Amino acid sequence: MGLAAGGLALAGLAGCAPRSKTLEKLLIQAPASPPSVALAKLVHDRAFEGLAGSAEFALWKDPDELRGRITGGQAHISGLSVNVAATLYNKGLGVKLTSVYIWGILYVVSADPNIRAWADLKGQELLIPFKGDLPDILGQLLMQQRGLELGKDIQPRYVSAAPEAAGLLAAGQARHAILSEPSATLAFLKAKEAGVALYRVIDMQKDWAAVTGRPARLPMAGVVVLPGLAQDHPQILQRLRAKHAEAVAWVRQNPAEAARLGATYIPTMPEAAMAASMPYIQLEYVDAAAARPEIEFFFQQLARLSPALYGNALPDDKFYAAS
């Protein structure tokens, strides 16, 4: 009897171990972008009921806020660029990548419908948000593959934010820009109001395929979790994987409904703009381990110009959350 009681007591202690303890509050953060609706939907649908006392969705406004919530242990789940995730990991934060779900958002937008290739921009000015960031580096890589050099053949005009570039295009104060979604769509909407015609002249994903022989997609953004979540709350990680995959598919298949939901969680973006941008965003949930070959190839190409973009080293096995 005593042994049996002792066994039950030990079982009770094991059941109280951190690995099965309910998390008091789960925070998910993501940027103000249409694909983030898939993460917001997890909170909307109460996907973590029974595993967390509450779940909250928050937008991060800039990289500093994103990093601050991760380093402070506040945001358990974060949607962010894959190269930023690798940089955080290489700085010793121990974040784990669970998936890649954004595979294409970059376009060259122009007021000239005759632009069809980088060579057509020779001798002209090109707006580029965020000097040294991914759109800039990827643009330079693609130009190099065509025998062109930024600063010599095409003149960069760097601006501090994508909305600034969109505004300059819409005002007719610039003719060409590299823009990510949803900024490209916002530029089109602003330009239409101003009576200015704009065109998507280069799909940078398709150009990537043309120069590399790879599929027309890039591992742009994914989801990371704090190391403590993966270790202490494996059931939350399992639920995240299953429900996020479902949510990504739902957003892709139901853009209008997703935009309506997004208007609630991303109030800074007009519903019409969100819906209009969806067709130009490549959404597909891919488990991090399965995406690893594409991630590493992408980073190896980025290394030709700026290995600092992903923290100067290819992340090791521990970066990829175990299935």
Image: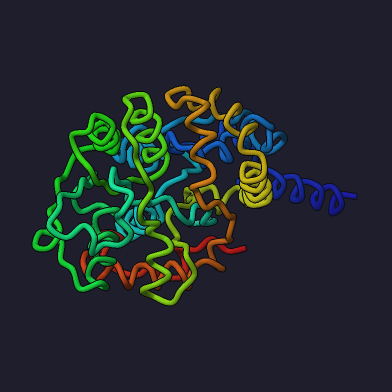
Q: Quick one: 316 or 193, which is closer to the camera? A: 193
Q: Quadrant of residue 195?
A: top left
How is the protein colored in the picture?
rainbow
| Left or right: where 136 falls relative to 46 | left
Q: Residue at x 25, y 72 (%)?
A: 146
Q: Residue at x 55, y 29 (%)?
A: 262
Residue at the outermost left position: 152
Q: Quadrant of residue 207?
A: bottom left
Q: Is residue 236 visible?
A: no
Q: How many marks?
A: 0
Residue at the outermost right position: 1
The correct choice, above or below, for 276 with respect to 138 in the image is above
Q: Quadrant of residue 141?
A: bottom left
Q: Is residue 321 visible?
A: yes
Q: Residue at x 65, y 48 (%)?
A: 249
Residue 172 horizontal/vertical position (percent) = 22, 33
Residue 242 horizontal/vertical position (percent) = 68, 51
Q: Residue at x 43, y 77 (%)?
A: 213
| Left or right: where 228 falls relative to 9 | left
| Left or right: where 194 falls relative to 104 | left
Q: Quadrant of the C terminus?
A: bottom right
Residue 316 horizontal/vertical position (percent) = 41, 70
Residue at the outermost front position: 114
Q: Quick one: 34 or 80, which is closer to the camera? A: 34
Residue 203 horizontal/vertical position (percent) = 40, 56
